[in-house]
Amino acid sequence: MQKVDVVVGGGIAGLLAALLLAERDGRKVVVVERESQVGGLLRCFDYAENGVFDYGMHNMYETGIAPLDELLFGLLPNEDWQLLERSARDRAGVVFNGVVQHNSPFPDLRSLPRAKWESCVLGFFRQLEKREFHSHDNAWEDVSARFGTAVAEVIDSALLKQFGKPAKELASFATRLTTLSRVVMFSEDPFSNLMESSTIRERLAWPEQRTLPAHWESGRKAYYPKKYGMYRVINALLARLDAAGVEVLTGAQVLSLEMGEGRVKALTLDYSGGRKEIEQLNQLVWTSGLPAMAQLLSLDISGYSFDPPRKTVVVNLLLKKPPNMGDLYYLYCYEPGCHTFRITNFAGYCEGAPRAGGWPVAVELLLDAPLPDAESLKRVALEELKRFKVIASIDEVNFVAAEPLASGFPMPSTNNFKALADIRGRIAAAKLDNLTLLGILSEEDVFFQRDVLAQTWTKLTHQEGMNG
């Protein structure tokens, strides 16, 4: 009987993993996805005559691994991609200190009152002189050591707005989840010489993203389908999987595992077609979160008390005219009292986005449970769009729909990160040599899509029988 590779989780990491396994010596691969559709956050909302919408802002970014980037870019014909390069790779802004910033997505401290800005500058250079850079237990300790107390207070306020918790209760990684790992402090002329210092460069941002000198750029490109919709990437992956004979089960989950001799030997699946036993398991690739895997391994995790994430709601709109966002693709919000996490202008980076006589925009909201009704969610998004002057009035809106997500932005609290680190260690202690953990936070610093894809490639192509 042929052995089977099972991939649990049908997001882009799981689908890529299945493709890498299936195209190795014609191996039998089964993908197991709990939802009714694969694709994870790269699925789409379909509103018939109003067209499809992504689940917020999602681009493809080069990983820096040439064969992986070639594989991903090759999912669609070259002419079907819209390339985003240099200063146009990822053009973003932020609402900070009551100002809609178009120059940088990092908080621009020059908008602060003069005395506060001077305090930030003085505290920053005094902290640099201390040279006390090491790992820290929480985000407050991290940003204080990197920037000084005055800047840390500014970042603390932004983190509180975003996650509902102060920096002292959040992991250091929280600042890297959006644009709080650096700040803008000076204009271009005085800053150009300071940029020569790597210590300065990793803390302070260039004040105008459109004029960043080429030698400071990463050199990596971003790309997005010209015809709009990241679901096109998922559909292309599914076509490749189908051609490779991969079986994709939706509405399915793993009920139990059988282990022995340091391996997962077999598993039982429950899905819409009934129960399925896979008795000749070759490899289990898990992309569906550490706690669920721990439970299948009969590890007692009842002692962990996880801090719940805020609820993510995507409000999709069609506007009668382009939003007042200039050339920005998206706009973060660190303004206290607001619920907006990010506003995305899809037409900013996709020429095929406009449809039905309108321009598509998405507002991602972060709110505490319980959520209000759909009409209230729409009102919140519209009022904040007006507050930030993205629209002048609701008369500019042709269509609006509010979509609460089952899973959204994680809660990067110190409590959660410590629990996940402990669970990772306990899973590793089981020493199952045919279990591979992939996906968001399967390792401490793996979160962004490009990092997850790079991790998937690296782990699976370095296993026996694959070419690196």
Image (cartoon, rainbow, N blue to C red):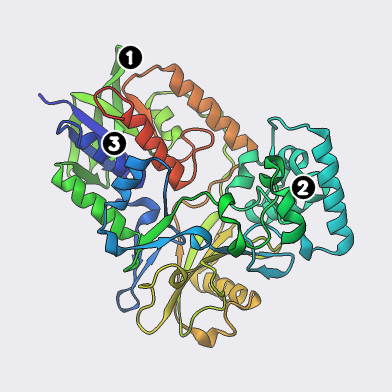
Mark earlier in primary sequence (3, 2): 3
Residue 245 seen in this snapshot: yes
Identify the residue at horizontal 31%, vertical 22% (top origin). Answer: 434
Q: Check disc 3 and report its element: helix, strand or loop.
A: strand
Mark earlier in primary sequence (1, 2): 2
Relative height, residue 217 to residue 224 (above, below)? above
Q: Check disc 1 and report its element: helix, strand or loop.
A: loop
The image quadrant of residue 468 is: top left
How many neighbours does mark 3 have within 10 angstroms: few (below 14), some (14-19), or many (20 or more)? Answer: many
Which residue is label 3 attached to? Answer: 7
Identify the residue at horizontal 45%, vertical 17% (top origin). Answer: 429
Looking at the image, the residue that sits furthest to the right is 115
Which residue is label 1 attached to? Answer: 262
Which residue is label 2 attached to? Answer: 152
Q: CA distance from mark 3 to mark 2?
A: 42 Å
Q: Check disc 2 and report its element: helix, strand or loop.
A: helix
Relative height, residue 406 to residue 171 (above, below)? below
Image x and y of residue 426, in percent: 48, 21
Dot 3 and dot 2 residues touching (CB under 8 Å) = no
Q: Which amino acid is tagged 3? A: Val
